[in-house]
Image (cartoon, rainbow, N blue to C red):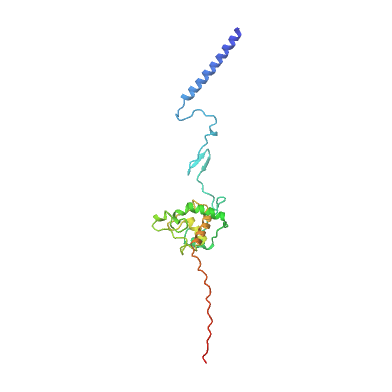
Amino acid sequence: MRQKLDNALGFIKKQAAYFVLCTLYFVLSSCGKSDPDSPGIEYMPDMYRSPSHEANLSTTFGDDTIQVDRMPVAGTISRGFMPYVYANDTGGYANAGRYLRNPIPFSEKVLGEGEVLYTKYCTHCHGATGGGDGLVAAKLPGPPPSYSSPGLMNLPEGKAFHTITYGKGMMGPHASQLTQEERWKIVHYVQKLQKLGAPAPAPATAPVEVAATTTVSAK
């Protein structure tokens, strides 16, 4: 009986010692911080508190300097990006109309996608049918011309794409909002609106029959 009592007391003393040490550790670790915002002792902090790189600044780690805003190597382009080679001037506008062609084959699916994009980005000024009667156009000093007007009815697809890319007149550029593929789909739909506004061909007239006349000589 005495042995069991001694064992129980020894176990209680060990548990009490562990409790005192743990309490002392937490007290010292919480009261000894010089920085009130410090979380205290962290186990492997680099696993969840990674160093950040500030934009447009260089960061130094030991002997290495990392330049965050480095420019791309000269002559290189991003993968999947197709540069637009025509300049934003009158010469580039003319050359786009002369040489640039729509690379996306026409289909009803493409036309439908172009209509959706046109409704989102163009209807407010150009109107649903391209008549230049959108809600925003009514508040402009001058509404955009209709697609059925002489100047736009036969506008080449290259010039239409160039205009969407860079803007023209009061129209702003849309290259930052629409990909090249999306712009070409809009061009397909604009061409449909151009055809809708074209005047109908004059009806063919039936040939006029001329009745034969007979001259009777008097005797």
Place of residue 17 in the rendered image (x, y in percent of width and height, measured from the top left): 54, 16
Q: Nearer the viewer, residue 185 or 45?
A: 185
- Establish if 26 lies above or below 219: above
In the picture as drawn, the residue positioned furthest to the bottom comes out as 219
- Establish if 49 lies above or below 16: below
Place of residue 148 in the rendered image (x, y in percent of width and height, measured from the top left): 47, 62
Residue pictured at 40% horizontal, 56% vertical: 138
In the picture as drawn, the residue positioned furthest to the front comes out as 219
Q: Give the quarter of the image for residue 134.
A: bottom left
Residue pictured at 57% horizontal, 14% vertical: 11
In the picture as drawn, the residue positioned furthest to the top comes out as 2
Q: Could you tell me how many numbered marks the image carries?
A: 0
Question: From the image, which quarter does the N terminus lie in?
Answer: top right
Q: Nearer the viewer, residue 97 or 126?
A: 126
Place of residue 70 in the rendered image (x, y in percent of width and height, measured from the top left): 51, 46
Residue 36 is left or right of residue 108, and the answer is left
* Residue 181 seen in render: no
Place of residue 170 in the rendered image (x, y in percent of width and height, measured from the top left): 42, 56
Residue pictured at 52% horizontal, 20% vertical: 22
- Establish if 219 lies above or below 78: below
* Residue 125 seen in render: yes
